[in-house]
């Protein structure tokens, strides 16, 4: 007997994603992914000064602000031919690298871990046994029985208030939770510690970008924060030392908590190494210029495409082979089109709210369907780690092999929900380890007397051609992010952003082919259709963020809040 279930919204904080799934005999046999709110920022950009685009596009999202800034400035730099100085490239690497670490820590502990960790069970744990478990996986400083007893008492007191906040709307006690109480208590303590850690380490953005979450120092052609060892208002030895201290905190937490947690939890959920597989197509734009050639040359994390799960060959990426299809998306446009020719003219034809189900035979999402050579691509940490692993990246190969060997499993487990979650931890480990290299390279270059921070040779729009077009790529924590810009008479004529969640959350294309979210759910067992925890696990493993694709919308046009600014 077939049953159709709906999870809406499925994202914990970021944007509005709806999943509808057909369940037969306890297994998902079909699925549809939908974003039910409209994005329109691309149209706001038309007619604007291209040099201001980064400042506007970082408002795509309240979390991943930096990623849209850098994709935007790279698009303009590509269009008008700017060459970014080495100092600016290293500063960008440090900003984006810390974005990876902070974002991945937040994702695992605050957006995804509760799909695997039963907080309620932690209340019955033995603190002495929890301390023994902690000491068996790392020498993390918070490991005493008294410490875990204190955490347990805090959780109990919190539960008594009846105001559970982020713990309120969950499937506690679900039979799919398999961790023993002591592991749940240990993970709950790390959830709380991660709140403090992410706050401390993101101070790097305030140091280099003047504020967070919307850094102010991005600039087409470079950065606007000066380098001068003799100025207190510039990047100097003191600021580099402060950043080093933040990275020390990040690295310690990743090495002694995050990665050990993944290794400790994974054995209880090895069945999820066979769930959540997609078409086997993985794409990475590559990231972190690691030499003096500048972006996009000599990238530390390589660009490439893996097709059909074949790790023996990494194919190059060519932006001209990317298109967006809108056959099942609520837009006027007809496709497929390359982003330079793309349009963002919404035309909602779905059911009138409130409704029970979407009409999935017609248009059913505001997300478009990106394709590479007509095929869907999964993007994100798993794609980056697979491309790097297959390309012979030593740090990635060492980290992946360490995790696989410790778990006693083969590389085939990577193509799964569990693999997706583990890949994010592996990436955090290698990026945190690399940060010091970029900082030292920056310091060494400044010490040579090279204070250059921006290429202003093409800053004046009168130096630009009448018409220009460019693209800017960035491997955001969630995956391949691309901005495409068309400039005419010094103004933006067209602007299109194809974000990571667009690749992963897209509806079917003109051939009826599923995108990664939809494909990954096929074959997933559902123990209780009224509490579909299993759907959350696979979708959350992608770290879905529909804020890039949608914005607040109320079909009843009601006033939700009023703010008085004094």
Image (spheres, helix red, strand yellow):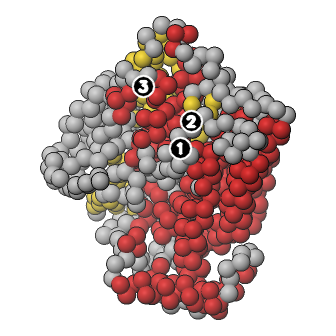
Residue hosting label 2: 218
Q: Are marks 2 and 1 in contact (CB under 8 Å)?
A: yes
Q: Where residue 137 sits: x, y (%)?
A: 72, 76
Neighbour tally class for label 3: few under 14, some 14-19, many 20 plus, Cα within 10 Å: many
**Does residue 392 appear anywhere in the picture?**
no
Residue hosting label 1: 215
Indicate which disc, 3 or 1, sits on the residue closer to the N terminus.
1
**Does residue 42 appear anywhere in the picture?**
yes
Q: Secondary structure at mark 1?
A: loop
Q: Between label 2 and label 3, give the one nearer the viewer.
A: 2
Quadrant the N terminus occupies: bottom left
Left or right: where 258 falls relative to 213: right
Q: Where residue 231 sits: x, y (%)?
A: 71, 42
Q: Secondary structure at mark 2?
A: strand
Task: Give the spatial CA distance, label 3 vs label 1.
Answer: 22 Å
In the rendered view, tell whether residue 231 sits above or below residue 15. above
Q: Residue at x 26, y 54 (%)?
A: 563
Q: Where residue 67 sits: x, y (%)?
A: 54, 41
In the rendered view, tell whether residue 542 sits above or below residue 374. below
Residue hosting label 3: 495
């Amino acid at each position: 007997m077939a049953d159709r279930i709906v999870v809406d919204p499925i994202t914990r904080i970021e944007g509005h994603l709806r999943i509808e799934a057909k369940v037969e005999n306890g297994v998902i046999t079909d699925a549809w992914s939908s974003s039910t709110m409209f994005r329109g920022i691309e149209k706001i950009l038309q007619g604007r000064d291209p040099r201001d685009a980064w400042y506007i596009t970082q408002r795509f999202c309240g979390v991943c602000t930096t990623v849209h800034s850098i994709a935007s400035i790279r698009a303009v730099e590509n269009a008008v031919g700017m060459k970014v100085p080495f100092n600016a490239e290293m500063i960008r690497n440090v900003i984006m690298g810390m974005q990876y670490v902070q974002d991945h820590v937040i994702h695992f502990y605050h957006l995804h871990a509760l799909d695997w960790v039963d907080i309620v069970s932690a209340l019955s744990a033995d603190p002495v046994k929890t301390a023994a478990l902690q000491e068996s996986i790392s020498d993390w400083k918070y490991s005493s029985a008294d410490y875990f007893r204190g955490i347990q008492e805090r959780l109990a007191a919190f539960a008594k208030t009846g105001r559970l906040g982020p713990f309120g709307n969950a499937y506690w006690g679900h039979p799919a939770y398999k961790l023993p109480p002591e592991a749940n208590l240990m993970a709950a303590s790390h959830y709380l510690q991660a709140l403090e850690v992410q706050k401390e380490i993101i101070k790097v953005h305030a140091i280099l970008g003047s504020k967070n979450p919307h850094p102010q120092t991005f600039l087409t052609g470079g950065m606007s924060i000066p380098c001068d060892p003799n100025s207190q208002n510039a990047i100097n030895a003191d600021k580099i030392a402060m950043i080093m201290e933040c990275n020390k905190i990040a690295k310690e937490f990743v090495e002694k908590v995050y990665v050990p947690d993944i290794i400790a939890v994974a054995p209880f959920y090895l069945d999820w190494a066979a769930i959540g597989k997609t078409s086997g197509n993985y794409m990475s734009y590559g990231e972190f210029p690691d030499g003096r050639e500048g972006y996009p040359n000599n990238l530390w994390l390589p660009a490439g495409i893996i097709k059909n799960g074949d790790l023996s060959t990494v194919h190059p990426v060519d932006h001209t082979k990317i298109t967006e299809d809108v056959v099942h998306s609520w837009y006027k446009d007809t496709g497929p089109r390359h982003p330079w020719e793309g349009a963002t003219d919404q035309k909602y034809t779905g059911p009138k709210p409130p409704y029970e189900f979407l009409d999935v035979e017609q248009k059913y999402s505001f997300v478009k369907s990106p394709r590479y050579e007509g095929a869907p691509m999964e993007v994100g940490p798993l794609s980056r780690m697979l491309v790097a692993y297959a390309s012979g990246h030593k740090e990635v190969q060492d980290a992946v092999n360490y995790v696989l060997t410790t778990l006693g499993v083969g590389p085939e487990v990577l193509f799964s929900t569990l693999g997706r979650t583990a890949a994010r931890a592996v990436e955090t480990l290698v990026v945190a380890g690399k940060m010091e290299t970029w900082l030292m390279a920056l310091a060494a270059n400044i010490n040579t007397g090279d204070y250059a921070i921006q290429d202003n040779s093409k800053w004046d729009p009168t130096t630009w051609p009448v018409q220009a077009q460019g693209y800017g790529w960035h491997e955001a924590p969630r995956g391949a992010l691309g901005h495409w810009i068309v400039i005419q008479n010094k103004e933006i004529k067209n602007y299109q952003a194809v974000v990571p969640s667009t690749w992963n959350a897209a509806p079917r294309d003109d051939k009826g082919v599923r995108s990664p979210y939809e494909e990954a759910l096929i074959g997933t067992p559902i123990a209780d259709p009224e509490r579909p925890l299993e759907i959350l696990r696979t979708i959350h493993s992608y770290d879905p963020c529909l804020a890039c694709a949608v914005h607040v919308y109320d079909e009843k046009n009601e006033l939700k809040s009023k703010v008085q600014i004094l």
